Amino acid sequence: MGYQKDVKSLMEKEINKNLENNQSFIVNDKHIFFRKIYNILFKTSIILFSIISIIPLFLILFYVLQKGITAIDWDFFVKLPKPVGVEGGGISNAIIGTFLIILMSSLMSVPLGVGTGIFLSEYQNSKLAYVVRLFVEVLQGVPSIVMGIIAYLWVVRPMGIFSGFSGAIALGMMMLPVIIKNTEETLKLIPHSLKEASMSLGVPYYKTILKVVLPSSISGIVTGVLIGIARIAGETAPLLFTAFGNPFMNLNIFKPMNSLSLLIFNYATSPYQDWHRIAWGASLFLIVFVLFTNLVANGVAKKWKVEF
Amino acid sequence: MESRVLEIKDFSMYYGDTKAVDNISMDVYKNKVTAIMGPSGCGKTTLLRSINRMHELVADTRTTGEIRLYDTEIHSISPIVLRRKIGMVFQRPNPFPTMSIYDNVIAGYKLNGIRLKRADRDIIVEDSLKKAALWEEVKDKLHRKGTFLSGGQQQRLCVARALAMKPEILLLDEPTSALDPKATTKIESLIEELKIYVTMVLVTHNMSQAARVSDYTAFLFLGELVEYGQTQKMFTTPEDKRTEEYLTGKFG
């Protein structure tokens, strides 16, 4: 407060001085000149910062592309990994595993997340909503490795076997907050009058939500799901002691399953040159997948947007 | 004597501890337009929304007294059934943004899961749009989105949507307040034409609109029914001093 008072009295003094000298205290060529300079400096620096922020991504893309592109051919997608020392082979088991695990996580977390999102937007001010919102925030901040340990304790230990299913549970928990928040935010934007229109036609509440409100917000919800998928596609830590990895093709969700991120982790830490190359290839594939998912999410958000 | 459709008797309505509608009794007559007017915050919209129990969407409301649709107390039947008998048009046009014009009109059936033959649906859609004076303008683009229409057209689409359910009463909540003068005129003449099909209750803050379109007028002030009677009589020889003052612009 004292500081502000000082500034104020200083300013008043300055203004009074200017008034006494019959000078204009606002229009002052020197001030204007410096203001323009500051403006230009400020603008240039924020543009510069933005460019610096995207440099890492470009470097990563460039580097991964350079290292990984040689590993990618048709066999890479359709063949199984070969033993050490044998040329060729692919990562089809990891690709299938990743998609299966993502599918399972989505099947679990989409209904849960959308349902919770509906609740949070419908009962915004209830006590339960407050608690749920708080927990969702915290869930979002839980380290991914902890999710893995939890899934290990809850699922792997009781079932006595590592499995793709347990990995999906760990990843589903990571996806959940993204979907909940997106659904809630999207639904909050739906005008109340739309719900009233439906209710006034004698449409029951649940049908109003399912048939009027949800279809109107489908773009936001789908975008949320896609962002959630992009978020978990490359997660490694939660899968280390859940899905565990598997050198063979496995479609049984209750058996250990390979994923791209696990394959990258295992191959990159191995001493074999050939495996390093495959790990780079898998990284490239994963990055392209995440990039693509994000682009689709943006497209959906724009294309399916409902105008009111 | 006109036949009575709706009977409001000693009806009060509270938001929490505040009384929004205070002990109102009035009758609504068949195939007439009844206007509810009064200054802002006098409870006219609240009263209107009580008629199809839309006020129940707001938490913490309470009512006393009776509202009877013919001989049925409206609180004794499910709001879902009631709302199919009492349609509503809102302040702002609110067609369903995901649906075509055709689907918007038939929405009451579709959303309620009432299955109709295609031919029956076509008849209902055409009939409702004709009643809402919109058919000529949209008959070639029935499968375009309802939100492509102008504001006035959208509002008439909402009228058609409510009419499609063949309601006993149509509630109009300041239906022209978001529209330009030209669209307002159209809605007003539409209200005149609709009288032969449906009984209407119109909330308006616009006195001249009440005078133009209604047969009966209720004047509400601070939640109280000050005066209720035939529009012509009320606007020429009001009984209550407050009505006269409101009509001459001394307050409100």
Image (spheres, coloured by chain):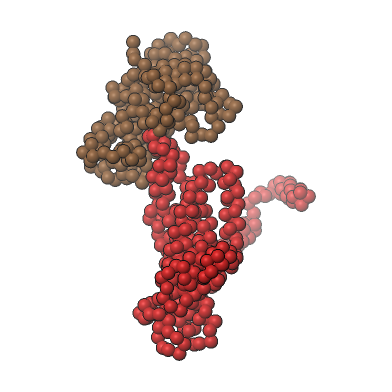
Chain colours: A red, B brown
Front position in the image: B74 or A245: A245
Residue B65 seen in the current view: yes
Please state the total of marks drawn on the protein image: 0
User: Dividing the picture into quarters, in which one does residue A208 lie?
Assistant: top left
- From this view, report whether residue B56 is shown above or below residue A269: above
Q: Is residue A240 left or right of residue B229?
A: right
Q: If the image is split into quadrants, where does the C terminus of chain A sit?
A: top left
User: Dividing the picture into quarters, in which one does residue A205 lie?
Assistant: top left
Q: In the rendering, at what x and y percent does residue A226 appear?
A: 44, 60
Q: Residue furthest left?
A: B119
- From this view, report whether residue B236 is shown above or below residue A266: above
Residue depicted at 29% across the width and 24% down the height = B197
- From this view, report whether residue A156 is shown above or below residue B189: below
Residue depicted at 53% across the width and 87% down the height = A271
Q: Residue furthest bottom?
A: A85
Q: In the rendering, at what x and y percent does residue B135 appear?
A: 25, 35
Residue depicted at 46% across the width and 53% down the height = A111
Q: Is residue A27 left or right of residue A177?
A: right
Residue A52 seen in the current view: no
Front position in the image: A7 or B151: B151
Q: In the rendering, at what x and y percent does residue A230 appear?
A: 47, 65
Q: In the rendering, at what x and y percent does residue B23 appear?
A: 52, 18
Residue depicted at 76% across the width and 52% down the height = A3
